[in-house]
Amino acid sequence: MKSLNNLECVTLFVDDLARARTFYEAVFDAKPIYSDAVCSVIGLGGVMVNLLQETEALQLVQPLVPAASSAGPRMLMTIRVSDVDDACVRLRQSGVDLVNGPIDRPWGRRTAAFSDPSGHMWEIAQEIPS
């Protein structure tokens, strides 16, 4: 069996595809790779992020049922930046409310967290010089 260490795509179930698409284009400066009536795929670094209308999610995860966005965060995705404070200014200018941060963490990172319109958690992080 070949290794399973080549992440290609993360699919996020979204409540409102148009709102999610607008958010990701503004906050991440992301352009759609593919888009149709129920999804919009964007590129973030070497990974694709598929924004999928939640009504379409069941077919991907059945027999399980996708959790409602109101269930709370279950995952945090981190983007490395060179300056968290500067990135926070840009996020606020884009209308993003931070959940927390910037905070210096004991594991040597300065971080801040925010969520997308469907509650998916994102973190920006930089290494704190020793």
Image: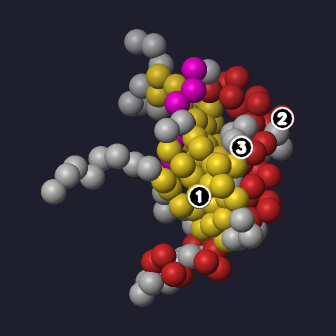
Q: Nearer the viewer, mark 2 or mark 3?
A: 3
Counting from the top left corner in percent of width and height, residue 81 is at 57, 26
- Local packing at callout 1 (Cα closer than 10 Å; few below 14, some 14-19, many 20+) is many
Q: Is residue 23 magenta?
A: no
Q: Which image quarter: residue 21?
A: bottom right
Q: Circle 3 sits on which residue?
A: 31
Q: Secondary structure at mark 2?
A: helix
Q: Secondary structure at mark 3?
A: loop
- Local packing at callout 3 (Cα closer than 10 Å; few below 14, some 14-19, many 20+) is some
Counting from the top left corner in percent of width and height, residue 8 is at 44, 50
Residue ID at (70%, 23%): 86
Q: Circle 1 sits on which residue?
A: 50
Q: Is residue 78 magenta?
A: yes
Q: Which residues are magenta?
A: 77-82
Q: Nearer the viewer, mark 1 or mark 2?
A: 1
Q: For the residue marked with disc 3, what is the amino acid?
A: Lys
Q: Circle 2 sits on which residue?
A: 93
